[in-house]
Amino acid sequence: MPLHNRELGSGIYRLRRTCGLHAQIYMSAIFAFYLSGVTALLADEQVTDAVSDSKIIADFRLRYAFVDQDSFDRNANAVTLRGRLGVETGSFYGIRLLAEIDATRHIGHYQFNSTTNGRTEFPVVADPDSFRLNRLNVKIDSLPNTSLKIGRQRMNLDDQRFVGNVGWRQNEQTFDAIRLTHTPLQDLTIDYSYIWGVNRIFGSASGKGTFDSKSHLVRATFSALEPLKITAFVYLLDFEDDPTSSSSTIGVRITGGHTINDDLSFSYAGSYAHQSDYDDNPIMYDLDYFLVEAGVNWKAFSGTLGYEVLEGNGRIGFATPLATGHKFQGYADTFLTTPADGVKDLYVTLKVRGLQDLLPKGVVFSATYHDFKGEANPIDMGYEIDGSIAAPITDHAALLIKYAHYKGRGFAADTDKLWLSIGYSF
């Protein structure tokens, strides 16, 4: 090899060696700095507490659903399994993080209409296969008398008549939102939410599984007049995907109760709301909502008598598109969408719980009777009888049996539904 080539090669070698040495020193310095930062961070008591206070979220529910509906020749039989896994950190300088995924899968043959599987020859069991990010949010509690939550979250407002997570379904409803709660006075709480997305119960594979939204929810709760609690609310719902569901709802809810002694107490609730079209809704309307409810609790027994009215004008009924509809007007879900003539629901509920001498601890029996009438046109809309048994199996597992019998009397199809559920969570 010529001399100049050997010198060139030697120079390149020395350059590479020198650069490599410098790079090693540089990377070692960065790594040492990183380790010192991590060590300092881990030594921070707030971080230690946040890690030690973190909670694993694990929630599973196996369910069998049966539907016999007169408008179908075949009955629905659905076995589904829902699982949720996630983590919620402890507080780090007033900040908490939560992340959760969920998945729903059917087991066995498709003998039901899941709303996404195309099996329209069967009645609907609205628990389609799905896999999605269920919740992902940050919660900030470091501001005085203020809580801020940003991201995908669960919302259950008041009795869930207007906004709820529809927790009964295997795929729950969550909201992409900013929620700010502020307590300027001891007995006054202001609650504001802006919703830009609604993740509905129809799952990740459905074309109607999400709603784009520009909705505002405002609530003010006043509790100085104990036992009364008064909540005023304004819900401005704006849905780009379903403008006919866009609405402006202004209302008030009053709840309270009175305890006579250890064995006897009374409760009451009342709501009123006025609703009109909002934003791009092509249907102009003005409708009202009423609810009155009274309850009594005596030892292991409780009873509730209620009357709920959702008005209609013959073209459209009072709408509650974000509600946990299954809680209201019967387990058969006949009135999830309010009829154009509206609906009146007179109902009575009886519950038995805590009879340790006769029943295992924690078992709850419930039965409800509904009588339905039209509002704008007082036609007979049928009646419904519902029943349920809830029983703990272990500290983390529970059994639920529910049954619904709806008799339409010519208004809608007669329907019988049965559910058997086993839930496990820790």
Image (cartoon, rainbow, N blue to C red):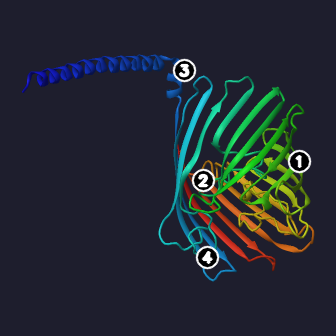
- The amino acid type of the residue labelled 4 equals Thr
The answer to whether the residue labelled 4 contacts the one labelled 3, judged by CB atoms less than 8 Å apart, is no
Q: Residue 154 falls in which quadrant of the image? A: top right
Q: Secondary structure at mark 4?
A: loop
Residue 98 location in percent, x, y? 57, 38
Lower sequence index among marks 1 and 4: 4
User: Which of the two discs, 3 and 2, labels the residue nearer the N terminus?
Assistant: 3
Q: Label 1: how many residues lie within 10 Å, few (<14), some (14-19) or many (20+)?
A: some
Label 4 to label 3, Cα distance in Å? 55 Å
Residue 18 located left or right of residue 214: left
Using the image, determine if residue 308 lies above or below residue 264. below
Q: Amino acid at mark 1?
A: Gly
The residue at which mark 1 appears reads as 251
First-in-chain label (4 vs 3): 3
Residue at the spot of label 4: 120
Disc 3 versus disc 2: nearer the observer: 3
Say which residue appears at 71% left-offset and 54% top-offset: 352
* One can see residue 410 in this view: yes
Q: Which residue is mark 3?
A: 46
> Mark 3: which amino acid?
Gln
Q: Which residue is mark 2?
A: 391
Q: Quadrant of the N terminus?
A: top left
CA gap, disc 3 and disc 1: 42 Å
Q: Nearer the viewer, mark 4 or mark 2?
A: 4
Vertically, is 95 above or below 206? above
Question: Is 32 above or below relative to 289?
Answer: above
Lower sequence index among marks 3 and 1? 3
Q: Which amino acid lies under the numbered mark 2 shown in the image of this protein? A: Ala
In the foreground, 67 or 396: 67
Marks 3 and 2 sit apart, C-alpha to C-alpha, by 40 Å
